[in-house]
Image (cartoon, grey):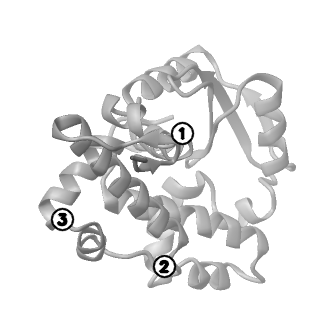
């Protein structure tokens, strides 16, 4: 009999192992649904689609990813607004196309999303100084970059290749390696942001990277966590 496979992993089985596989598959499907939906579904819709109660689905999602469904929706919206800011005719168009319900909502969230003003982001970082540092993780190297308002990029890269990606994202910014204090904060944030063991065992690597990078942003954007 052929087993059920979730993104290359066999999740057939009974008991705890089988339930874990089924839960991981439900979480992965929910992430794909949020990634692909024009208007990301809310918690009730995600839980219903997965066949669980809101409470059970919320707990299960965080157990595997380390982030909440709401945080993952924020990741999707942030990714869209960064794309739209680079391509839309105006900032207002980018805000509307990204799903923000008001300019005020976007501008209150923009420092955590962009690390700089929307105008600076659209200009390729013109006039900004961006510090960066790299740290190891269970998923591979992570590069974290920060401008004057906060984290502006978290990349699955390191060294010269990572700096090259950063230069393509912000061609008009001045890039500089962060000092030892900055590097230490980045390393500590990456350690605290490691994906849960349950997720590392069963979720696709690309989803784990998204969640790891979001947790790094959270760690470096929280109260008293100035970068």
Q: Which residue is mark 1?
A: 205
Instruction: Answer left or right for 35 relative to 92.
Output: left
**Nearer the camera: disc 2 or disc 1:** 1
Q: Position of residue 122 (x, y in %)?
A: 76, 65
Q: Is residue 59 left or right of residue 37?
A: left
User: Element type at marker 2?
Assistant: loop
Residue 85's x, y, as percent? 70, 70
What residue sits 56% from the left and 44% below the top?
206
User: On the image, numbered disc 3 is attached to which residue?
Assistant: 52
Against 113, residue 49 (above or below) is below
Q: Quadrant of residue 163?
A: top right
| Residue indicated by mark 2 | 100
Relative to the observer, which residue lies in front, 145 or 17?
17
First reached walking from the N terminus: tag 3 or tag 2: 3
- Distance, label 3 to label 2, CA atoms, is 28 Å
How crowded pointer 3 is (Cα within 10 Å; few <14, some 14-19, many 20+) is rated as: some
Of circles 3 and 2, the one toward us is 3
Q: Residue furthest top?
A: 180
- Total marks in image: 3
* Residue at point 39%, 31% (across, down): 201
Looking at the image, residue 77 lies above or below residue 37: above
The answer to whether one can see residue 170 in this image is: no
**Could you give the CA–CA distance between mark 2 and mark 1, rounded to whole angstroms?**
28 Å
Name the secondary structure under disc 1: helix
Tell whether label 1 touches label 2 (CB within 8 Å). no
Task: List x then y, in percent, for residue 17.
Answer: 24, 35
């Amino acid at each position: 009999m052929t087993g059920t496979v979730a993104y290359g992993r066999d999740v057939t089985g009974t008991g705890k192992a089988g339930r874990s596989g089924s839960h991981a598959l439900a979480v992965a499907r929910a992430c794909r649904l949020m990634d692909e939906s024009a208007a990301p579904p809310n918690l009730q819709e995600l839980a219903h689609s997965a066949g669980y109660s809101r409470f059970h689905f919320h707990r299960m999602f965080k157990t595997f990813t380390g982030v909440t469904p709401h945080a993952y929706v924020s990741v999707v919206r942030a990714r869209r607004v960064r794309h739209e800011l680079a391509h839309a005719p105006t900032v207002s168009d980018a805000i509307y196309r990204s799903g923000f319900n008001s300019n005020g909502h976007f501008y209150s969230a923009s420092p955590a999303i962009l690390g700089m003003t929307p105008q600076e982001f659209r200009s390729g970082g013109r006039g900004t100084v961006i510090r960066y540092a790299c740290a190891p993780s269970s998923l591979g190297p992570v590069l974290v970059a920060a401008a004057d308002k906060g984290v502006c990029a978290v990349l699955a890269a390191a060294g010269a290749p990572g700096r090259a990606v950063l230069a393509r994202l912000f061609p008009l910014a001045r890039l500089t390696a962060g000092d030892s204090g900055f590097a230490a904060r980045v390393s500590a944030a990456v350690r605290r942001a490691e994906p849960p063991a349950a997720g590392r065992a069963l979720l696709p690597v690309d989803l784990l990277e998204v969640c790891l990078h979001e947790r790094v942003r959270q760690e470096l954007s929280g109260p008293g966590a100035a970068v």
